[in-house]
Each structure stands twice: as structure tokens, then as C-alpha cells.
């Protein structure tokens, strides 16, 4: 993909170890934002951005309501809110019902991002134990974006990327070791 | 290597604390229940304990009290943590040696360990 304008990464159980391996590899000159939506419980809020920040020289921050999306920043969705991408390229946090037993639901972010960034969007689904993100990847493909998954064989919990592989035409299946370099190649 | 035992029912907290504290050079064990608290702690003998308030079975307050009544375990510092606004009074009620308000960041976690182990 050339001219990537955003990368959204969704994950659940087993996805943290993948992020911790990928982040140190990322170029500091990243020309697009990375938006991370991880299923997690309330209570660990400061620790996750703090920990991810310790693995990269890129700016890492937890998302605030109505915040403008800036290239070269790694954004973390807060726990307990759905994360929507608005047409004016700002974030919106939503406290409506859980989807796929999850809030944040990866589907919501993938789908709203697809409508904004269209064929300049890449979405990556990591390890996890439910099918959240699969419908979102379908929407990404419909708008011409790139659908990526962690190789289910390398995933701590294979179900989520395996479901995506089963139901969506995936553009790239990435091993843990290749994720960082692949992100750098998006540019 | 100093040993840390973290009790919390939030799997995310346990996963994050494990990575952070191992990075910082500690050995860490985690548990999501206060059941048989004495046996759990006796089997590991940590240098410091983190105790969540909302812990399945007897709960953080009772678990801490049991530890503080135990002849050999009472000397191990217990840091009480909770998202509750009253974390300080809960820690006092439990007889804990310190407290940490949730959410906390890496620096706060490492600082409180250093403070209690030195």
C-alpha cells in the first residue's frame, strides 16, 4: 500500500506480547497514525500506554474524546468505551452497549475508520478469543482498504485471526516477527 | 532477585504488572484469588505483596488481616491497591503497610516497591 493514512490494530487475549515485539521495530518517521484497540478491563488504564511507550520512541497516548488524529502517534483506546473515527478525523468515545461481548469493540473502530480512510486504511487483527473484528475487516475490504491478520499459527489465542481468515479475503498474514517491518513498509 | 506477589482478579493488571516488574528485574508471581491466602504466600515467600481490594473468596481486607496475624508472614510488606476513593482507609482497615490508587503508572509501581524494600 502506498499513501497509508491510518493503521488500526485490534486485539484481545494474547495480543500484548505481539505489540511489545512490534513496537521497538517501528520507524520514528512513521507518516500515519497507529490506533490500537485492545479488549481490556477497567483498572489498568495508565499501565498499558505507559508500557507500550517504554518500547518505542514514537509518541504513545491514551485517546481523549474529540481528539484530533495526528500522524506519527500511537493511540490507545481507553477501556470501557467504543472508539469511533469521525469524518473530520477526530476520535469519538461511545458508551453504548457491548458488541461481541466487548467494549471497546474492534468492529466499531474498523468500520468507522473504513468509511473515513477508505483505500488508505490498513487494519490488523491480532490474537484473541472471540470473533470481534471480523465484520470490521469485511467493511475495510469493501472500502478498498488492506485487511491484515496475525498468523493464527503464531497467535497465543488463534480464534480471532482464524475466524477472519475463514470469512474475509485477507491481504497479508503476518508472523509476529514480521509485523513491525510490515508496518514500516506501509508508508 | 527480589520477589513480588500480586493478587488481583483483573487479568489485565496481572499481565501488565508481570511484564513491567520482570523488566525492572523482579521475580513475580500472580494470583486471582484470596482463597488459602496463607498457603499461597507460604509457598512463595515474597519480599513484597500487592493486594487488590475486590478479590474473590475472602477479599483483600480479610486476606491482608490473615497475613498480618501470621507469625512468619506478618513482616512482609503488603501494598493495598484499589480504584476505590477510600483506598487509604481500606488499607488502614486491612492493616496494610502502604497503598496505591488505581489507575497507577509504572513509575508509581516501581517507586512504592523501592520505598518498601529499602
Image: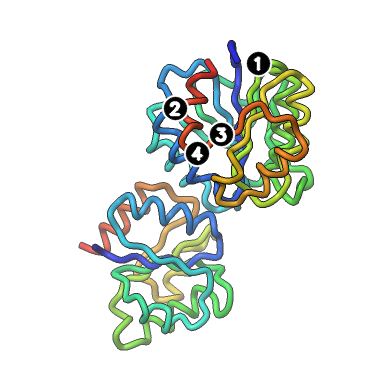
Q: CA distance from mark 4 to mark 3?
A: 6 Å
Whether residue B41 is situated above or below residue A126 in the rendered picture: below
Identity of the residue drawn at 40% across and 76% down = B95
SS type, badge 4: helix
Q: Are marks 3 and 2 on the same chain?
A: yes
Seen from this angle, which residue lies furthest top?
A3
**Where, by quadrant of the figure, is residue A116 drawn?**
top right
Q: Nearer the viewer, residue B54 or A122?
A: A122
Identity of the residue drawn at 39% across and 72% down = B96
Disc 1 chain ID: A
Q: What x and y, as percent, mark residue A56?
A: 40, 31
Front position among marks 2 and 1: 1
Q: Which mark is residue A120?
A: 1
Q: CA distance from mark 3 to mark 2?
A: 24 Å
Q: In the rendered structure, which disc, 1 or 3, sits on the residue that comes first in sequence?
A: 1
Report which residue position mark 2 lands on: A59
* For the residues bearing labels 4 and 3, Cβ distance under 8 angstroms: yes
Report which residue position mark 4 lands on: A176
Q: What x and y, as percent, mark residue A60?
A: 47, 31
Q: Nearer the viewer, residue B23 or B67?
A: B23
Report which residue position mark 3 lands on: A174
Whether residue A65 is situated above or below residue A81 in the rendered picture: above
Identity of the residue drawn at 51% across and 25% down = A182
Amino acid at each position: 500500500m502506498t499513501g497509508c493514512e491510518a493503521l488500526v490494530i485490534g486485539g484481545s487475549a494474547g495480543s500484548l506480547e505481539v505489540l511489545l515485539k512490534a513496537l521497538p521495530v517501528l520507524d520514528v518517521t512513521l507518516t500515519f497514525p497507529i490506533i490500537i484497540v485492545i479488549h481490556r478491563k477497567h483498572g489498568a488504564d495508565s499501565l498499558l500506554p505507559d508500557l507500550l511507550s517504554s518500547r518505542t520512541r514514537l509518541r504513545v497516548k491514551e485517546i481523549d474524546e474529540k481528539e484530533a488524529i495526528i500522524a506519527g502517534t500511537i493511540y490507545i483506546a481507553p477501556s470501557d468505551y467504543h472508539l469511533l473515527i469521525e469524518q473530520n478525523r477526530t476520535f469519538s468515545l461511545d458508551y453504548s452497549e457491548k458488541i461481541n461481548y466487548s467494549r471497546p469493540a474492534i468492529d466499531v473502530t474498523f468500520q468507522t475508520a473504513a468509511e473515513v480512510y477508505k483505500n488508505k486504511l490498513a487494519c490488523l487483527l491480532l490474537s484473541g478469543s472471540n470473533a470481534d473484528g471480523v465484520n470490521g475487516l469485511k467493511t475495510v475490504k469493501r472500502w478498498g482498504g488492506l485487511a491484515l491478520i496475525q498468523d493464527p499459527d503464531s497467535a497465543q489465542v488463534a480464534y480471532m485471526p482464524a475466524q477472519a481468515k475463514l470469512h474475509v479475503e485477507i491481504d497479508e498474514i503476518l508472523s509476529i516477527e514480521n509485523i513491525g517491518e510490515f508496518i514500516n513498509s506501509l508508508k | 532477585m527480589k520477589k513480588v506477589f500480586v493478587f488481583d482478579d483483573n487479568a489485565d493488571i496481572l499481565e501488565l504488572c508481570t511484564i513491567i516488574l520482570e523488566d525492572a528485574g523482579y521475580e513475580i508471581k500472580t494470583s486471582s484469588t484470596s482463597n488459602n491466602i496463607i498457603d499461597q504466600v507460604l509457598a512463595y515467600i515474597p519480599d513484597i505483596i500487592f493486594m487488590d481490594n475486590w478479590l474473590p473468596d475472602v477479599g483483600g481486607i480479610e486476606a491482608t488481616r490473615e497475613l498480618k496475624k501470621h507469625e512468619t508472614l506478618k513482616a512482609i510488606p503488603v501494598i493495598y491497591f484499589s480504584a476505590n476513593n477510600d483506598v487509604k482507609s481500606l488499607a488502614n482497615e486491612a492493616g496494610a503497610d502502604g497503598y496505591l490508587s488505581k489507575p497507577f503508572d509504572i513509575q508509581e509501581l516501581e517507586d512504592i516497591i523501592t520505598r518498601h524494600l529499602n
